[in-house]
Amino acid sequence: MKKIIYLFILIANFGFGQSGLIEIEIKDSIRMKPINFEYNVQISESKFNRYYENGAIGKDSAKIKMQEKNKELELFLENKNYKIRPLNNSEFQIHDFAGFWKLGFAVELNTSKQLEKLTTELKTLDYITGSVGEIEYGDTELDEKRLFSKILEKAIKKAQMISSLTGQKLGKIIEVREGKEIDNISVNIKDVYLSALQNKNWDVNKNIIFGQEWKTVVIKFSTE
């Protein structure tokens, strides 16, 4: 009986000694072009903080001033033929004080050039802040396929290099496993604030807005 057990162990060890695996982890991304996006233009509450000094009366003054500026902003955008929607949904509004909800408008845009034009026009207003809001992408399945192809190509090249250096013969892919989806999609513009006085440059790569989809993928190859 002992001889049979020893023989089984010997065969098992021989099998594992003749074959193995290489595990590669690749993290990469692709750029995704938005088909449309919104730019949120909001009345800056900090511009009206000085009205709070007199308690309730001050808050009422701030509320009135902010609502006046909101109407002025609406006319400004409508006169320039922008498609807009209110940032504050009145159907779900609980408080009537401007500080509890966003006063302003989301402007619908399609290209980076339109954003450049809009922000240039808005620099004449010193009572607003601006940031990129909702972004819609096109064929996300095609983008995912493009990203996986890029990752697989990198993984194969890396596995070939490792197998060559270690004197192994690279076999087929035996497992593909995705990492956790943490911050999977990012945008190259994050909380960009508009201020006519500060005259800041926009964080846009070559004046183009783009999204990025990231994936971490672990790929196992058999070896001999």
Image (tube, helix red, strand yellow):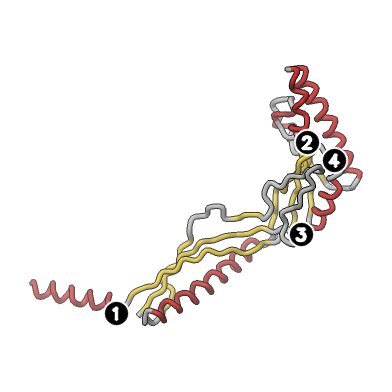
The amino acid sitting under disc 2 is Ile
Q: Is residue 66 above or below residue 86?
A: above
Closer to viewer: mark 1 or mark 3: 3
User: In the shown orientation, is residue 4 left or right of residue 20?
Assistant: left
Seen from the viewer's position, the closer of residues 44 and 5 is 44
Type of amino acid at the residue the image marks with label 4: Leu
Residue 50 percent across, percent down from the top left: 77, 25
Amino acid at the residue labelled 1: Gln
Amino acid type of disc 3? Asn
Q: Is residue 67 above or below residue 152?
A: above
Res 23 quadrant in image: bottom left
Is label 4 in a helix, a strand or a loop?
A: loop
Q: Tell me the crowding category of disc 1: few under 14, some 14 to 19, or many 20 or more residues within 10 angstroms, Cα based.
A: few
Residue 186 occupies quadrant: bottom right
Viewport quadrant of the C terminus: bottom left
Q: CA distance from mark 1 to mark 4?
A: 73 Å
Report the residue marked by disc 2. Answer: 43
Percent across and percent down for residue 168 are 37, 81
Q: Which residue is mark 1?
A: 18
First-in-chain label (3 vs 2): 2
Residue at the limit of the structure toward the front, as seen here: 198
- Characterize the local packing of mark 3: few (<14), some (14-19) or many (20 or more) Cα atoms within 10 angstroms: few
Is residue 34 in sight in this rendering? no
The residues tagged by marks 1 and 2 sit, at their Cα atoms, a distance apart of: 69 Å
Label located before the other in sequence (3 or 4): 4
Disc ID at residue 207: 3
> What secondary structure is found at the residue carrying circle 2?
strand
Q: Earlier in the sequence, mark 1 or mark 2?
A: 1
Which residue is identified by label 4?
Answer: 125
Q: Of callouts 1 and 4, which one flags the residue occurring earlier in the amino acid sequence?
A: 1
Q: CA distance from mark 1 to mark 3?
A: 55 Å
